[in-house]
Image (tube, rainbow, N blue to C red):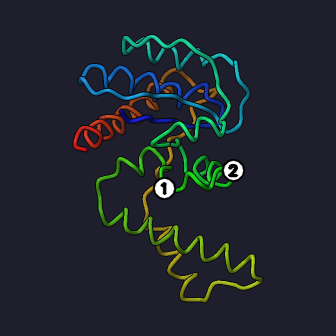
Amino acid sequence: MKRILFVCTGNTCRSPMAEAMLKRMAHMKGITVAVRSAGVSTVDGLPVSKHALDTLRERDIDHKGSSRAMTAEAVEWADLILTMTSGHKRGLLQWFPEAVDKTYTLKEYTNIDERVLADIEELEGLYTDMHMKQALGQQLTSLERTRLLELERRIPDFDIADPFGGSFALYASCAQEIETALVRLLDKISKR
């Protein structure tokens, strides 16, 4: 059974919606998964946003629970960690570098364009080189800098915008974006 952890900022909007939606969608397809969610900047016990709950109810999904802060136990538990933004991914990997091989943004992981995935891998390698060189008091070469900027421009945005404090329509739009990625995620899981 695949264990999936969704991560956002406060664990009151995007990641609880993704958690609840995936549980329901997987159940409907007969796919067994264990799903949790957590926030990189929250405390345990905050209520899930009213608009997030209303958005789920519109999809006939009931969600009970409250925010959970990211923990080492949750990272260790997960086979796959899917963040809502690249910022969440970077932050999580700073705290838990051992999770590098199982952490992606949701939209990055469900992207089906192999060229984009190759670009991401190359860009992450350049970022690693840049950090290593900075630690040693060195800089990227002009060729490396040029390539890094080219890749940053070429790679699509894999972030799911935070609807926190927004209208119900904004939450509904966010949920639709998440759902589209979850359909691809279930297809990917079912093929393994």
Q: Amino acid at mark 2?
A: Trp
> Which secondary structure, mark 2?
helix
Residue at (72%, 85%) from the top-left corner? 138
Residue 26 location in percent, x, y? 31, 25
Residue 58 location in percent, x, y? 40, 13
Along the viewing direction, whichever of 141 and 174 lies nearer the viewer: 141
Give the quarter of the image for residue 156. Answer: bottom left
Quadrant the C terminus occupies: top left
Q: Amino acid at mark 1?
A: Asp
Instruction: Tell me if mark 2 has few (under 14), some (14-19) or many (20+) residues whose alpha carbon lies within 10 angstroms of its own.
Output: few
Q: Residue furthest right?
A: 137
Q: Which mark is residue 101?
A: 1
Quadrant the N terminus occupies: top left
Q: Is residue 149 above or below residue 192?
A: below
> Is tag 2's residue or tag 1's residue first in the polypeptide sequence?
2
Q: Is residue 105 above or below residue 34?
A: below
Give the quarter of the image for residue 135. Answer: bottom right
Q: Which residue is mark 2?
A: 95
Residue at (44%, 34%) from the top-left corner? 3
Residue at (67%, 72%) from the top-left corner? 131
Residue 172 location in percent, x, y? 45, 25
> Which secondary structure, mark 1?
helix
Give the quarter of the image for residue 165. Answer: top right
Q: Residue furthest bottom?
A: 142
Query: What whole-number distance in Å separates the C-alpha atoms at marks 2 and 1?
Result: 14 Å
Number of numbered callouts drawn: 2
Instruction: Tell me if mark 1 has few (under 14), some (14-19) or many (20+) residues whose alpha carbon lies within 10 angstroms of its own.
Output: few
